[in-house]
Image: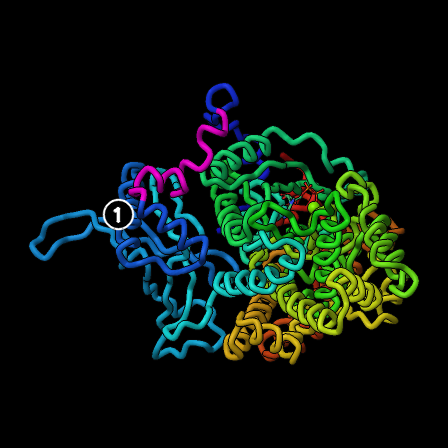
Amino acid sequence: MNVSRTNALDTILNRTDLDLDLPTAESQPISEFFGVNVFNETAMRDHLNEETYLGVKKAIQAGTKLDRDVAEQVAEAMQKWAMAKGVTHYTHWFQPLTGRTAEKHDSFFTLTPTGEVIEEFGADVLVQQEPDGSSFPGGGLRSTFEARGYTAWDPSSPAFIMEIGEGKTLCIPTIFVTYSGESLDYKLPLLRSQAYLEKAAIPVCQLFDKEITRVSATLGWEQEYFLIDETYFNARPDLMLSGRTVIGKAPAKGQELDDHYFGSIPERVYAFMRDLETECHKLAIPVRTRHNEVGPGQYELAPMFEAINVAVDHNQLLMDVMERVGRRHKLRVLLHEKPFAGVNGSGKHNNWSMSTNTGKNLLRPGRSPYKNLLFLTFLMNTIKAVANHNDLIRGVIASVSNDHRLGANEAPPAIISVFLGETLTRVLEELKKGKSETKSTKELLDLVSSIPDLEKDNTDRNRTSPFAFTGNKFEIRAVGSTANCAGPMTVMNSIMAQQLDIFYKEVQEKVGEGLSTETAILDILKQYIIDTENVRFEGDNYSDEWKAEAEKRGLNNFLDTPQALDVYAAQSTKDLFVGGGIFSEKELLAHHEVMLEAYILKLSIEAKVQSELAINYVLPAAVEYLTKVTNSINSAKSAGLTDLSGLVQTANQVANEINILKAKSAELVEKVDSIHDAHQLAKIVKPLMDELRAACDNLEGLVEDNSWPLPKYREMMFIK
Ligand code: ADP
Ligand code: MG
């Protein structure tokens, strides 16, 4: 039985506050419990002997395999540490292509051949496991007769304890591969892309500074989400099955007043946030920022940035923790990009940069001309990489849910362009004008030396840009709120690595021709400034003028996922990924396949649930109301009233919408069942869903409020 709307309202009005005992700054400052549930440096140092500890650290830093002996000792230490904290089970934790995380718990306890009960955990189970992976998406990589998938320990991301109620499980971050080692997850490509980036970035860095011997990408994500009361969630089959409301009339008051943004946080939500933050801190997820977002009922939280693979794990973990903490508060976290039509959607900005072993952020301008040349090199190579693979950035963020957001007028457009801000644009223009014939290298370097502190100069930040330079990092804003950041981050690392390789070769060539390194670099950067003009855009990305202008510039504007995903079949993508060692051709094909399959499956679910709601919820309410109106017409006639035009008009309107509803839902079901091609589905099914929705929403506007069966937008978004 579904929860009815009236029941839901009653339940919510009778809610009492949750009795929470959260640490405060006086009772227990964050520094005292940060990371207690993580097998981090401190835990390792406490539980491993000096030699093993150093061995582990070295292997992690060099990205090499751990010796069997060392792994055995780590396993033992991990078990001891975990059991002392009350852990009974362990699991390999991984990120299959479903987009979320997966785990299969095993107990430490086991029976020996003689029937003795012992607690056991060794290198064998730490390093590798074979979960029954046959039901995870594999895009044809696994035939059913060898459905096995393996999970393999990733020592670069620390193990952690997941607390669910009283239960505690040791989670070991792993990658998920097929029997023959092909990638079936998000993590392996990410790790490969990090290696590719590092290999390409080091020689470029060493043109400037020989001390730089390590480069790693950094990621700081910002997670947007909606919160609604659990009871409303349970009363909306569409939210339960597809994560968004597929019907629902816009409320009289939406976000027009902008009064929610950065407003004061409602008490119940505040309790949820504090609880969530405490859980995050125990897991060493360094969340720092919380605020209301633009949409009513919409919020955001953001951590400090971290090394890219740890940041990705932390975001995946966060999404799980959020949902669990939400339930404790009788709230449901909606991570969907567009749970409610007509109000802002949710994104997950990915702030991306690179840092070195010398502590330098490669996208932060420095104090000397030389340092600024290093900065400009990385800046221009990033933009050049985006210009080279514009469509791939669009492709990797494409999903059935993000389609509702991209290109809708309050979200980043589906056209990928780069925003730099006034100051940097001016610097680039100056550099471009300064031909080496007319200006000496010294003069150009002087020019470069005058880059002002950009972080302080962020007043002109363009919030409409999908890819913006924000002082010391690029912010990729088109990523959807449900996405695994590993997708876009793998693309960023890879396109940057490929571009840096090209750049380095170009420098070598010019130096070979007798130019000084600086002149060579400046020459190439000037060329890049010209080459990237078409992807640089400073204006309003939401405007129609930009759409027209972008078309002139040859930039694509793919409005749906299947179109956006075509880039995965392009030669340029194959060259990039296969050449960089990120994917084999087979893996690339499989990943493309999985993304298309996910689109088809999810769209079909949405269409079916919409048609169910139309027939089983909206139609009965409309019929009941129509009966009421026609009965009134009859009794009014009997009472001798003559002008019944208002009543008749209402009855006609309702009857008319019912006709549309019936016709469209039948057509929708028929199309969903018969079309199996993603491009066709997008073209035919989506417009049908819009038409069916319009009929349902019109009926919501006509039918009396008391008998409307589904929670309305104004209730879900505004009642706290
Ligand atoms: P916003 O105005 O978009 O909220 P913030 O200054 O709050 O910008 O930063 C947003 C995110 O950028 C944070 O998660 C922060 O950790 C991250 N960030 C800052 N510096 C870097 C960096 N060098 N690399 C990656 N992310 C970074
Ligand atoms: Mg941001």
Q: Position of residue 647 (x, y in %)?
A: 82, 52
Is residue 695 in view?
Answer: no
Query: Would residue 371 appear left or right of 7 to someone viewing this image?
Result: right
Q: Quadrant of the C terminus?
A: top right
Task: Say if the magenta span includes residue 49.
Answer: yes
| Residue positioned 65% across, 63% down in the render | 496
Q: Position of residue 693 (x, y in %)?
A: 71, 61
Callout 1: helix, strand or loop?
Answer: helix
Location of residue 105 with respect to 359 vertically, above or below: below
Q: Position of residue 297 (x, y in %)?
A: 66, 41
**595 or 616, which lies in front?**
595
The amino acid type of the residue labelled 1 equals Glu
| Residue positioned 12% across, 54% down in the render | 112
Q: Which residue is mark 1?
A: 76
Task: Residue lying at the far top in this picture: please name it.
Answer: 26
| Residue positioned 46% across, 56% down in the render | 101
Q: Position of residue 352 (x, y in %)?
A: 64, 53
Which quadrant of the figure has residue 381? bottom right
Magenta range is 29-50
Q: Is disc 1 surrounded by few (<14), some (14 to 19) or many (20+) residues within 10 Å?
A: some
